[in-house]
Image (cartoon, rainbow, N blue to C red):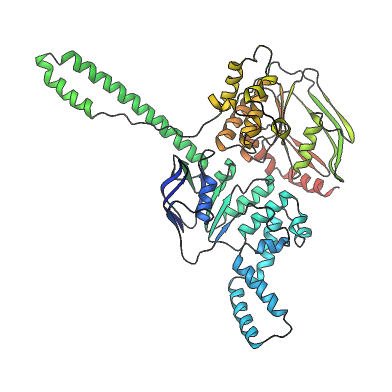
Amino acid sequence: MISAQDITLQYGGRVLFKDVNVNFTKGNCYGLIGANGTGKSTFLKILAGDIEANSGSVFITPGERMAVLKQDHFMFDEFEVVKTVLYGHKRLYDIMEEKEKLYAKENFSDEDGIRVSELEGEFAELDGWTAESNAEILLNGLGITNEFHYVKMKELTGNQKVKVLLAQALFGNPDILLLDEPTNHLDLYSIKWLEDFLMNFENTVIVVSHDRHFLNKICTHIADIDYGKITMYVGNYDFWYGYTQMTQRQLKDQNKRTEQKMKELQEFIQRFSANASKSKQATSRKKLLDNLQMDTIKPSSRRYPFANFKQDREVGNDLLEVKGISKTIDGKKVLNNVSFLITPNDKVAFVGKDEIARTTLFQILMGELEPDEGSFKWGVTTSTAYFPKDNAKYFDNCEDSLIDWLRPYAKEGEQYDADIRGWLGRMLFSGEEALKQAKVLSGGERVRCMLCKMMISGANVLVLDEPTNHLDLESITALNEGLIDYKGTLLFDSHDHQFVDTIANRIIEILPGGIIDRRERYDEYLENEDVIAMREKFSQDE
């Protein structure tokens, strides 16, 4: 068990946590949620001992081992991959290193022999003999195949490093597991593997994630941070969301009924207080009125943007035809003879393990890259709006205010400050926020600006490359609902399972040997046995 007792943390005049008391017990998985800036990652760091609170303490059951998902992707660059995973159980790693040094000694003394004997005993107790094979199983489950197990970490890609550090945190069956955004940069298959792993994990898990499907699958409890406090709810994310929405509605309804009752009592008192025959009743009603009180609703600190995409004109029957597109990037063929036809009202989710392939396809379709082979043709009635994965060119070194930044994208007659402020307000840039310089925005703020730009466009085809990256749960929910309601055509990719499943009516998976194209929901697609067989075939074809 791990518990926080009377935790208070303050930065300057801002109180992040005040007298927080919360227990996390064995066998449960806790989803730590809250609006951006409420301190989710900070609280994990307090639990991990990386940040010291102003007051209060963290208690861990004696003898229990804690593992934390590390965020420094360069920390282990000189380590072999398997050794990086083994480092997750520091005591076991130290024993292995000391054993290796002792056995390598030329002059092996009696004291060395006694020490080795002690180490071997502890090594066996910690399941040291199966440690490397267990590490390899974790790596393979996350998509780091055998050929990478004994190379240096610096030889891996950024996404591969993320997976290795995740395997490191999971290794050795820790008693307490702290995970901050573990699904970031994972493909959908690795996320599925992680879900299964954590559902079978018997110890304590505390996780911060913006992936609603992930939280729904693994969480037994939701710990909600709001106004510097943590409130615990039994159940997964959907249960928490439904319950909090319901209680707020009930409280509002109750207050309405109370308000009506108060009005009736006041009217009675006013009518009959001067009437002798009714004065006794009026007095009793006045006492009742005095005892009636309204429950005050403290609104959540969460802020939901308003994502509403409308097309200025409907698209014709000829929308997009892609014929035999191939493209090689850095010596690797990422697109191999890709062909498909997009029709009106298609909402197509592009999936697959190779995110470079999807980004490359979108860049080709939006004219940012030329294909090596093949062609594509947009219909004459199409108008497109594009959300690139990398939006740096729109913001870096841009000193314009957000009003001036957005103005060039506004339609004629809608370029006045009041109009622009209206659009920005939908994306939570109200008042002084609209005067921020574009170059100082956070990742999430940049995404909201790009979505604002797309809403203004009135396009009948939206192309979105990982739009949920950097967004908080509230913004993801709003964008999710906005794209469900969108009447135009949509081409997108996302690591957010729920986002894909609830929006897409068609799935196109890009594989080395070709594509799989199905008109069905994502969950149905994943369970389709024909698809599974085709995926295996096309994954082997190079």
Q: Is residue 445 left or right of residue 345?
A: left
Near-viewer residue (499 or 43): 43
Q: Which residue is outermost to the bottom?
A: 110
Residue 148, percent across and down?
77, 58
Residue 11, percent across and down?
48, 44
Near-viewer residue (475 or 399): 399
Q: Is residue 373 left or right of residue 79?
A: right
The reply to whether residue 430 is in sight is: no
Q: At x 44% / y 39%, what residue is drawn?
A: 227
Residue 66, percent across and down?
54, 60
Q: At x 23% / y 30%, what residue is drawn?
A: 291
Q: Give the vertical position of 150 relative to 455 (above or below).
A: below
Residue 28, percent across and down?
49, 53
Q: Give the vertical position of 429 relative to 133 (above or below).
A: above
Q: Which residue is outermost to the top?
A: 413
Q: Which residue is outermost to the right?
A: 373
Q: Quadrant of residue 482?
A: top right
The reply to whether residue 39 is in sight is: yes
Q: Quadrant of residue 17?
A: top left
Near-viewer residue (359 or 313): 359
Q: Quadrant of residue 464?
A: top right
Disc count in the image?
Answer: 0
Q: Give the vertical position of 28 relative to 106 (above or below).
A: above
